Image: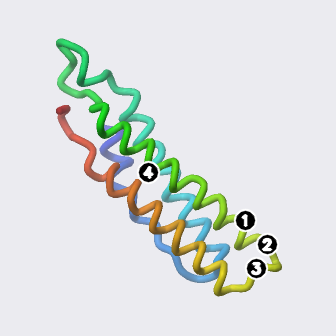
Amino acid sequence: MLVVLFIASFAGCATTGGTPQQSIYAIKSEYQIALTAAVAYKGLPSCDIAGHPLVCSDATVVAKLKQADSVAGPSINAAEAAVRDPTFDKSTANMVLLSAQQALNILVAITAQLPKGGK
């Protein structure tokens, strides 16, 4: 559980800026950190099981993580494709980067609030 908390504490630390390629690299890095925390949390025993351990995963939180990832993942992939495509202009690439960052922010916000000691 300490690993989950450690990883979650760093989610949101990546900064975007510079070129669109640098921005997507930072976004993807932050996404991997948040996703690692989400997967670790999901791997905990369920809080719904009778006699669950003190440190457990809440099904509602797991569902929110899945929903946030289902938006963030494809958005980030689309932004990466846009910034790597030479036919996209910089303003279009910046718009999809902003969209990817906003989707990621939701996932990061959830992982940053993961319970520290169970339900």
**Disc 4 versus disc 2: nearer the observer:** 4
- Rounded to the nearest whole Å, what is the CA distance between mark 3 and mark 4? 26 Å
Q: Would you name the residue on which mark 3 appears?
A: 88
Q: Nearer the viewer, residue 1 or 84?
A: 84
Specify whether 54 is left or right of 44: left
Can you say which quadrant of the picture contains the C terminus?
Answer: top left
- Rounded to the nearest whole Å, what is the CA distance between mark 3 and mark 1? 9 Å
Q: Residue at x 64, y 67 (%)?
A: 79
**SS at circle 3:** loop
Q: Would you name the residue on which mark 1 appears?
A: 81
- Rounded to the nearest whole Å, what is the CA distance between mark 4 and mark 2? 26 Å
**Which of pointers 4 and 2 lies earlier in the amino acid sequence?**
4
Specify whether 111 is left or right of 52: right
Q: Residue at x 30, y 53 (%)?
A: 112
- Rounded to the nearest whole Å, what is the CA distance between mark 4 and mark 1? 20 Å
Amino acid under disc 4: Ala
Q: Position of residue 101 (x, y in %)?
A: 49, 68
**Which of pointers 3 and 1 lies earlier in the amino acid sequence?**
1
**SS at circle 4:** helix
| Direction right: furthest residue | 87
**SS at circle 2:** loop
State whether residue 83 is above or below residue 74. below
- Rounded to the nearest whole Å, what is the CA distance between mark 1 and mark 2? 6 Å
Q: Position of residue 87 (x, y in %)?
A: 82, 79
Instruction: Identify the disc placed on residue 85.
Output: 2
Contact, mark 2 vs mark 3 (Cβ under 8 Å): yes
